Image (cartoon, rainbow, N blue to C red):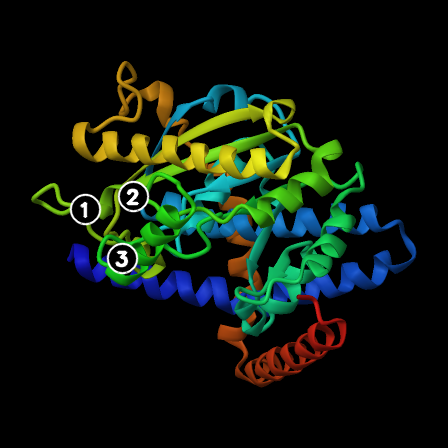
Amino acid sequence: MKGFMAKVRYVFAVMVITGSAPNYFLLWALWRGISLFMPHWKYQDGDDFLYSMYQRMVIFFFEHCTGQKVYFTGDAAAIFSKKENVLYLGNHQSTVDWIVCNMVAIRQGSIGHLRYVMKDTLQALPLYGHYFYQHGCIYVKRGDFKQKKMESALDYLKDPKIKSWTVIFPEGTCFAPNEYDLIKKSNKAADDNGLKPLVNHLIPRYRGSFLALAKLRSNLDAIYDVTCVYSGSVNDKKERIPAPELIDFLLGKNSEMYIHVRRIPIEDVPEDEAQFKSWMHSLFTVKDELVSRFYQDGYFQKDVELKTVENHYALPYTATVPSFLFFVLSFLPLVLFPELRLLWLQGILLSTVCGYLVLAIKSVC
């Protein structure tokens, strides 16, 4: 019965998240039109509000609906106490990692301000590919990195009136313990550069983070160094296995998440590129030790017990349910009126094609 309910939850979540997307983008398009003659930061305020609504609905499914328990250690209390503009550096092991960003940001009240530095292949996502660009996300090409393109995109976020969490996963690719060739390649890169190889991470790429920092430093309060471990990344024999993916989450294959957050004041981060490169590797060396300690001993910090009320930071249902209800109701007409489904599909197709054209014309990465 439990397995059946998990499948029902998965199907329902996919239906609502994807089914309400065209309605969301219609709302966004209306706001985009209304705000054309407003300052760009005014547009961004409205867009961030809409993005927050949608992501709160996503969190409803991935945290509340699954009964996920999320435990925080480190500087969580300080981070959740006030809003800030930050550069978010996270470890990368799963397609769920962007949900982790949501879970951290929503507890600060900054979920609408998340903007990702992401692979250019994500431009191909119907509707979302174009929208991410309009939201302030930055596409980059692996193997053909165009610095000027990224700098141009970052210039937009320099406006002090635009609140932003710029999210980067410096490893660039998901780490998995069974990706032997990838790990071997990463270790070779470490050896070639005289760096210490990592056990639980790939060697971080520093250039994108350095560019973001150089461009946005005057508008940043801190760097958030976030390290996440999923309970589903360990088997019954206490051996590490690949972290659960989005589908696994909705099917209930991960029950707990452990997130260690460290706030690094921006003035403590080196401005020199060579020093920053070394600093970045040191950052990941510490992350690597944290994760190794967790898998070996069950904790990040020796004197901090993980599963306590103090570090659970339970998210109230009022933070997610209103958005869930709004988008369910927006999806309901498609169920009740079959003739609307054709318009819905046509809207998806037309919006996607137009989005592709905009991205191609602007050559965003």
The x, y position of residue 167, in whole percent, is 56, 45
Name the residue at the left extreme.
237
Q: Given the image, on which type of amino acid does mark 3 rest?
A: Leu
The x, y position of residue 233, in whole percent, is 23, 47
Mark 3 or mark 1, whichever is nearer to me: 1
Q: Quadrant of the N terminus?
A: bottom left
Q: Secondary structure at mark 1?
A: loop
Q: Which residue is mark 1?
A: 240
Query: Within 10 angstroms of label 3, few (less than 14), some, or many (20 or more) residues?
Result: many
Q: Secondary structure at mark 3?
A: loop
Q: CA distance from mark 2 to mark 3?
A: 25 Å
Q: CA distance from mark 3 to mark 1?
A: 20 Å
Does 8 sit above or below residue 321? below
Q: Residue at x 26, y 19 (%)?
A: 305
Q: Residue at x 47, y 26 (%)?
A: 262
User: Mark 1 or mark 2, which has the lower sequence index?
Assistant: 2
User: Mark 2 or mark 3, which has the lower sequence index?
Assistant: 2
**Circle on res. 200:** 2
Give the quarter of the image for residue 209. top right
Q: Which residue is mark 3?
A: 251
Can you see residue 202?
A: no
Mark 1 or mark 2, whichever is nearer to me: 2
Q: Residue at x 43, y 67 (%)?
A: 15
The reply to whether discs 1 and 2 touch (Cβ–Cβ < 8 Å) is yes
The x, y position of residue 145, in whole percent, is 61, 62
Q: Residue at x 51, y 69 (%)?
A: 19
User: Mark 3 or mark 1, which has the lower sequence index?
Assistant: 1
Q: Could you tell whether 326 is left or right of 17 in the image?
A: right
Of 285 and 42, nearer the camera is: 285
